């Protein structure tokens, strides 16, 4: 017998992507009568709420709630507290999901008897432009990122965090909810808290989602800058430090100009690999720029996070 599942999507101003996200959920091979989709709207200023309401008229299992505080952590907690399922699946509006996403999450949650299961995300360009493609490739490269859920794995393995996540609802009753002091990094902090409590998190490569990255360098810079801030600033609110990989861009920036020379070599090496694989010579020039935007902005954000931390 199928288990009741609550899908929580906390989002704001996602009119460009919410339709793709909901279409992929509607197309799931899991019984619809066992699903509820809770969209927690952070007071959107675009047409996202209107789009969701149109979907909910045709699909009653799609419900919308308001999040006056706007930030994701508040929205996730609103969703969890209003959910009815025994299983909570955290999804992102900026992504779409393979049709067996839910069924495979539940399969491995039960098979491995873990508390959180997640899969791999494939980063896709938001537009059909060479810059958007370069950004997506940077977020799919081992030099660009270090997260297991972005790079993938050949077999299921235990990790410290996953994208989104499929949780037993009882976990939130025992571990607590998302930390509302954190504007970002709330998933990472919760999962580290989960592991500290002796619980297990499983990454399964055949559970697949697609994430749409930024389509221009300006937005890419600020997205990574904010991520960098919330790699260091959370130390003001939590006692558990993040993993070493989250501080590598900070170390890189703080050790300039010594670190720049090996960085340049690695950047051009991975850029050349991508150029050969994609069979497009333009990437030889664009990929070093994309990598630089990724690492410098994240590192500068981490420094700003430390400055805020010391205030």
Image (cartoon, grey):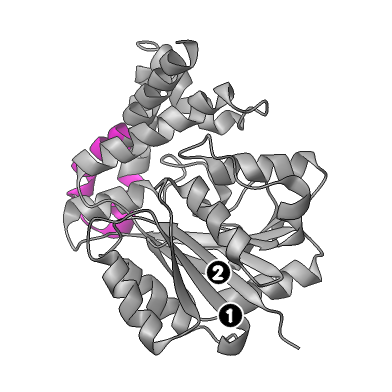
Position of residue 60 in the picture relative to residue 154 (left or right):
left
Q: Magenta segment: does it hold 137?
A: no
Q: Start and end of the magenta stretch?
A: 272-293
Q: Residue at x 16, y 58 (%)?
A: 129
Secondary structure mostly seen in magenta is helix
Q: CA distance from mark 1 to mark 2?
A: 7 Å
Marks 1 & 2, CB-CB < 8 Å contact: yes
- In front of the other: 215 or 53: 53
Residue labelled with disc 1: 35
Question: Which SS class for mark 2?
Answer: strand
Q: Residues within 10 Å of mark 1 (few under 14, many from 20)?
A: many
Position of 18 with respect to 308 (left or right) is left
Q: Residue at x 36, y 81 (%)?
A: 55
- Res. 195 in view: yes
Picture coordinates of residue 33 (x, y %)?
59, 88
Position of residue 306 relative to residue 10, above or below, is above
For the C terminus, which image quadrant?
top left
Label ID, residue 243: none
Displayed quadrant of residue 21: bottom left
Image position of 68 with respect to 257: above or below = below
Counting residues from the start of the chain, the first of labels 1 and 2 encountered is 2
Give the quadrant of the N terminus.
Answer: bottom right
Using a 10 Å C-alpha cutoff, classify the residue at mark 2 as few (fewer than 14 neighbours), some (14 to 19) or many (20 or more). many
């Amino acid at each position: 017998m199928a288990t009741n599942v609550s899908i929580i999507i906390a989002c704001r101003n996602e009119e460009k992507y919410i339709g793709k996200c909901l279409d992929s959920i509607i197309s799931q091979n899991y019984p619809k009568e066992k699903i509820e989709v809770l969209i927690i709207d952070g007071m959107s200023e675009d047409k996202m709420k209107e789009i969701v309401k149109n979907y909910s008229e045709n699909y009653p299992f799609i419900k919308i709630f308001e999040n006056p505080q706007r930030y994701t952590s508040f929205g996730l907690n609103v969703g969890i507290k209003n959910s009815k399922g025994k299983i909570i699946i955290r999804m992102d509006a900026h992504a779409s999901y393979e049709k067996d996403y839910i069924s495979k999450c539940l399969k491995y949650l039960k098979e491995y008897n873990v508390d959180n299961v997640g899969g791999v995300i494939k980063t896709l360009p938001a537009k059909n432009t060479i810059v958007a493609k370069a950004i997506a490739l940077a977020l799919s490269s081992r030099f660009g990122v270090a997260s297991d859920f972005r790079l993938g794995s050949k077999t299921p393995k235990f990790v410290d965090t996953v994208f989104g996540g499929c949780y037993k609802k009882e976990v939130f009753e025992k571990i607590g909810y998302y930390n509302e002091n954190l504007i970002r990094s709330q998933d990472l902090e919760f999962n580290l808290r989960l592991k500290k409590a002796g619980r297990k998190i499983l990454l399964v490569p055949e559970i697949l989602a697609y994430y749409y990255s930024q389509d221009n360098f300006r937005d890419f810079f600020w997205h990574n800058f904010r991520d960098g801030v919330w790699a260091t600033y959370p130390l003001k609110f939590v006692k558990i430090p993040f993993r070493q990989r989250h501080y590598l861009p900070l170390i890189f920036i703080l050790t300039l100009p010594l670190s720049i020379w090996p960085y340049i070599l690695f950047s051009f090496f991975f850029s050349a690999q991508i150029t050969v694989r994609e069979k497009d010579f333009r990437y030889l020039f664009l990929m070093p720029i994309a990598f630089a935007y990724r690492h410098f902005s994240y590192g500068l954000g981490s420094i700003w996070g430390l400055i805020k931390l010391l205030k």
